[in-house]
Structure formats: C-alpha cells, structure tokens
Image (tube, rainbow, N blue to C red):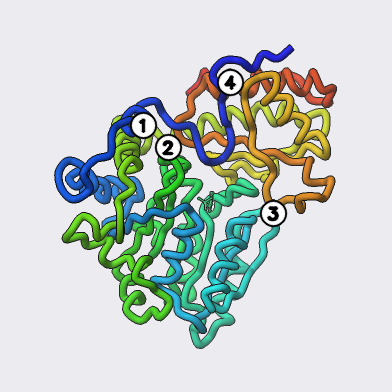
Amino acid sequence: MSLANGRHYLAIPGPSVMPDRVLQAMHRAAPNIYSGALVDLAATLPPDLCALAGTSGKVAMYIANGHGIWEAALSNVLSAGDKALVLATGRFAHGWGEMAERLGIETEIIDFGLRSPVDLARLSEALSADKDHRIKAVMVVHVDTSTSVRNDVAGVREALDAERHPALLMVDCIASLGCDRFEMDDWGADVMVAASQKGLMTPPGMGFVFFNEKADALRTGSTNVTKYWDWRPRATPEEFYQYWDGTAPTHHLYGLREALDMISEEGRENVWHRHATLARCYWAALDAWSSEGPIEVNIADRANRSHSVTAVRIGAPRGTMLRDWLTQKAGVTLGIGLGMAAPGDPAWHGFFRIGHMGHVNAHMALGTICAMEAGLTALGIPHGKGALDAAALVCSEA
Ligand SMILES: *Cc1c(COP(=O)(O)O)cnc(C)c1O
C-alpha cells in the first residue's frame, strides 16, 4: 500500500519548493518586453538582490543556470594564462575549477576532501608560497551542495589580508543565498555568484553575478569576456533589454519579484534563523538515528555544516532503498548523493541528501523526519530511538 497520494514534497537541494505565490505571479500572458510594467519591475530587482547579499556593489542578471553563471563570473575577471587557486570541498568547487581550465585559466587546486571545510592554515601556506602573486583569484564555494560543508568565507578573506595577497575572492553562493548568513561586503568577497532555483525559490534559469569595484577593474583587461557574458551593460542598464542581450526571462522576473518580496516580508535575519533551526531539527533526528546503526551525517562538526542541505552516509544500497521507499510510499523525495562515489559504483547507493532550502517550514521538516523514521523501520535499517522527540524539541524551542 502506498500512502504517497497527496501533495508531493521534493526535498532535494535544488530546484527547491516553489511557493504558490511565486507560481501565481508567473501565471499570466506574455508581457510586452520593451516598455511598461515588466521593464519597471526588472529595475526593482537589483537593489533587493544586493541587499540580500549584503553588498553595495553591483549585480548583473543573466538567463543562465548555475553553470552559466560560473562562466559569466570567470570570464569577466580572468584571462587565458591567468592563475586561480581553487579551494575544493566537494564536487561543485571541482566543477567550477574545471570550467576555469576550459577557459584557459591555470588552476591550482587544494583538495580538502569530502568531509572537511577549507583549512585556513593550508590556504595561508599556499598564499605565502605565491611570492610573485601569480594567483589572480581564490575560488571557494560557500556551501558545497554535494558534501553539505559550509566554508568560512570571512576567514578566507582574513588569510588573504594577512598575507597581503591581492587576489580576488570569488565565492559561489548558489546553495546558500537566502538560506545561510552571507555578508558580501563585510566578509570581503569581491565576486559572488547565485542562481534562481535554490534559496531564491524561483525556477531554474536565472543567475546573478555580484561584483565590487576591485573586480570590475579586472574586467577591463579580460580577454575571455564575450558580449553575452559582459557584466558591465547588465549592471548599468540604460535600456531594459541590455540586461538580457535578447528577450527578457519574462516569467522568471515576476516569480523572482514575488520571492524577493516574501524574503523581505519575513526579514533576512528571520529567513536565516528559520533555515538554521530546521537544519538543527534534521541534525537532532540524524544524531538519534546514528546512535545505533549505519547512518552518519557527512560533516561531523555542526559549525561546518550548511543550513540548506545535509549530506548523509548510510551505506549501500540503503541510501537508494530509503529514497525509493520515501518517494513511493510517503510522497517525499530526498536528493541523491553527489560526488561521493562514481555512478555505476555500487557504493553510489550509500548516500542521500536532504534539501532544506527556501520555502520550507517546521511541518515539512518534521513530516519528512517522521516519514524517514517509518522508512527506516519498514526497511529494517537499524537506527537509534528518539529521533522524533529530539526533532520536535528543536522546533518547540525555536
Ligand atoms: C546547484 C549548484 C550549482 C550548479 O547550479 P546549476 O543551476 O545546476 O548549474 C553550482 N554550485 C552550487 C554550490 C550549487 O548548489
């Protein structure tokens, strides 16, 4: 018997749940893209995006997913032959680094593995070894969605400053903007990238590059930048269509406007607090389960865990069994493991991820946890007791 009929909950780390308000805002006929309401609406987005990111810098909006936005950011500041230092704490940092290489950028990768954040001491060593400042940019992922590690971006800036190293600090906040605290200016990030389909609760298809004056100065010399990726016309729009270099992403704009309104109605601090509390709710349950049996949160230290996604180790084939059970019997879908084992390797089935980003609340987290408990029991996967009590207690104290 399946108990899955009812509203399905896709609890994967992006695309995230779309609020009804966002969907309704998008449900309309095609608007005029040359003048009128849509043009006015588009101009309201950059100030709100910058406020959310904590920057007085600029933002360029693109029609692109996260991968496109990676390329947009790199091509504006780094040319073929330039060198970048990639701080790798999971699949996404490696992916961004690989993209840099395809642009002819030389990369030095410090690999911190799949279970730890950036080690700032090792970063300092690499920076101090770079005596003639060949490294033009340090690339780091704030929340790596594959490992669910969260890196200390302000700490990376302190390491750069302590070494008096002039490299740009480039940060991927695709999985953290609108979920985890991020203060672009205070933390000293020069370039930051984000996308629409995670904390911003809008369908995939729009991406954002935030940048300051220091980064824009490097734009002048870039030989990689193409007309489409150039951030300058997009960040200083005299004409609406210059934002887009073609047809505007009409319905995304309505959806994003609504999502940003929802974030400002709730308040940035409250949004972060909600994500932090729901993350702790999941961790409390996972701690209880892992007291007996094979379940383990990938990142041991809570201080280094993302508030938007949690990667879990459970041993093959239990990860896939549990995910399938939850989809088929309980109407909730968890994310696959990513970057932990190669697809095709039987070990691939030993991981899953829970997305708790964006439009999520206590009953969604508590419901998912209770459904997971039912799945563990039904499948005979050993697990410690008390998960539901522990999770409820976290929410009761919020
Ligand atoms: C999702 C994600 C990406 C890639 O975004 P796409 O839209 O899938 O290309 C990159 N970095 C991080 C941290 C992500 O979470």
User: For the point 56% across and 26% down, which residue is it?
Assistant: 9
- Crowding near pointer 4: few (<14 within 10 Å), some, many (20+)? some
Amino acid of disc 3: Leu
* Residue 266 location (% of width, % of height): 33, 30
Query: In terms of sequence position, does the residue under pointer 2 or pointer 1 come before the other?
Result: 1
Q: What secondary structure is found at the residue carrying circle 2?
A: loop
Q: Is residue 46 left or right of residue 146?
A: left
Q: Is mark 2 within 8 Å of ligand 1?
A: no
Depth check, mark 3 against mark 1: the one in front is 1
User: Taking 70 as reference, is 202 above or below it?
Assistant: above
- Crowding near pointer 1: few (<14 within 10 Å), some, many (20+)? many
Q: Is residue 157 in view?
A: no
Marks 4 and 2 sit apart, C-alpha to C-alpha, by 20 Å
Marks 1 and 4 sit apart, C-alpha to C-alpha, by 24 Å
* Residue 6 location (% of width, % of height): 56, 15
Residue at the spot of label 3: 114
Query: In terms of sequence position, does the residue under pointer 4 or pointer 2 come before the other?
Result: 2
Residue at the spot of label 1: 22
Residue at the spot of label 4: 366
Q: Quadrant of the N terminus?
A: top right
Residue at the spot of label 2: 201
Q: Is residue 70 in view?
A: yes
